[in-house]
Every structure is written in C-alpha cells, then in structure tokens.
Amino acid sequence: MKEISWLYEQAIIVTTQQNGSLTVRSPRFRQRVYSGSAGSLIITELTKKDQGTYSANVEGRCTDFYLQVFKPLSAEDIQIHHRIINMENCSLTLSCNVTGPETRSFWENREASDGIKGNITLHVIYTNASSKYTCTAQNQISRVSRSVIPWTLCREVSESNETRPETQYIRATLVVFVPCFIIISAIISVYVWARHRHQLGKSFLWSTSPVSDENSILI
C-alpha cells in the first residue's frame, strides 16, 4: 500500500494511505485535514495562512500543488461613491470599489439593451427617476451586488443642503431684508413721484402768471 507524504514549506504535515487513513504530523493542521480516495488530502477551515505550495511525495517522486485562498465577498466589500454634476437633471458619476485581491467589478442596468453599462466609473446623464444601477463584484468563489438609484442620491443631497445652517441663515436673512427692501423701494418711489409732481406744479403756475410789460403806460 503506497503512502503519500504531504509537505508544506518543505516540512511533512500529513501522511495518507490509499485506504483513507492518515497521520497528522503538524499540530497546525490537526482536526482540519482528511484523506479522500486514493490518499488525496482535504483541508478545511482555510485561512490566508494556509495559502502556498503543497507537495505530494510518493516513493521519492514529488508533485507540487499551489493553494490559493479566497475570502467570500459580502455586500459590505463594495463601496459606491458618487459625484453630482448637475442637480437639475441628476447627472452624476458613479464609482464602484471592491476590497480584496483577484476581484472583478462591473455596473449593470437592466433598462439598457446590453445590460452592462460600465466597469469602475459610470457616467449617468438624464436618468429616469426609478432607474437602478447595480455594481456586481465577483471572485473565484463568490459573487455579490449592491444597487443604487441616482435620483435618491440627488434628493438626499438636496435635502441635506436645505437643512444646512448656512442655508437656514441665508433664508432667514432673505425673510428679513427682502420686505425691508420692498418697503424702502416703495418709499423712494413715492418720494420721487411727489417731487416730480411738485416740479410740474411750479412750472404750471409760472406759465399762467400775468406778464408785466415795462414799456406799458398806465392812463
């Protein structure tokens, strides 16, 4: 019966038999390794520390295997950022960042004919109020998504601006000064009108008064 010696970092960690029996040599792998058919090795509860090159030694002949460990992605690994270009029509850019190595991300919009609208950065112009954009991230073992509605982002920014202290101050200032400006403008208008009317009255009196003739002789 052939025995297989499994090595990690050039040290024997497990020996397996073709009948499924095994002997664990490294405490680090105890209760985490099993033997499959024909003496294959199964490692459970993997961590990044288990990543690396493993060797199977059968009667002095070695075969190397490289184990790469991937972390399952979650929705929290996707970070969506936006920058508003035009509030009136809610034009903005969306960027999708994903943490973790060996990941791929792309944008999707089911209203588009091809489905895929972009990769890392997406420019959204004249979008519908209910239009939804989804950032999907995937690696070799998992696939997750997060969605965003652009008009919701624009509305949140608009509402945030409305409640800012400086906005409230400007609004209060306008409430106080606009009526004052209107009243002052009305007073000035009345004054100018009255002065103009007074000038017209003086001109009329002057034009209708009798003209004295120095050359006339009273008899």
Image (tube, rainbow, N blue to C red):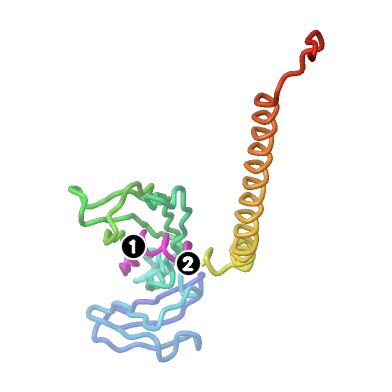
Looking at the rendering, the stretch of residues picked out in magenta corresponds to 135-159
The numbered disc on residue 8 is none
x, y percent for residue 26: 49, 85
Query: Residue 38: where, in percent of width, then height?
Result: 23, 78
Q: Residue extending furthest left?
A: 113
Query: Which one is in front in this view, the residue at disc 2 or the one at disc 1?
Result: 2
* Placement of 113 over or under 158, stated as above or below: above
In the image, what residue occupies the spot 36% across and 57% down?
Answer: 105
Q: Amino acid at mark 2?
A: Glu
Q: Of 54 and 138, which appears nearest the observer?
A: 138
Residue 137, magenta (yes or no): yes
* Residue 44 among those drawn in magenta: no
Decide: is 27 above or below 55: below
Q: Quadrant of residue 3?
A: bottom left
Residue 207 pos. (x, y %): 66, 24
The residue lying at 22 percent from left, 80 percent from top is 37
Numbered tag placed on residue 149 in the rendering: 1
User: Which residue lies under the disc numbered 2?
Assistant: 159
For badge 1, the amino acid type reads Ile
Q: Quadrant of the C terminus?
A: top right
> x, y (%) of residue 143?
30, 67
Say which residue appears at 76% left-offset and 18% top-offset: 212
Residue furthest to the front? 219
Would residue 37 be found to the left or right of residue 91 on screen?
A: left
Q: CA distance from mark 2 to mark 1?
A: 16 Å
Q: Depth check: give the residue in front, 10 or 48.
A: 48
Q: Secondary structure at mark 1?
A: loop
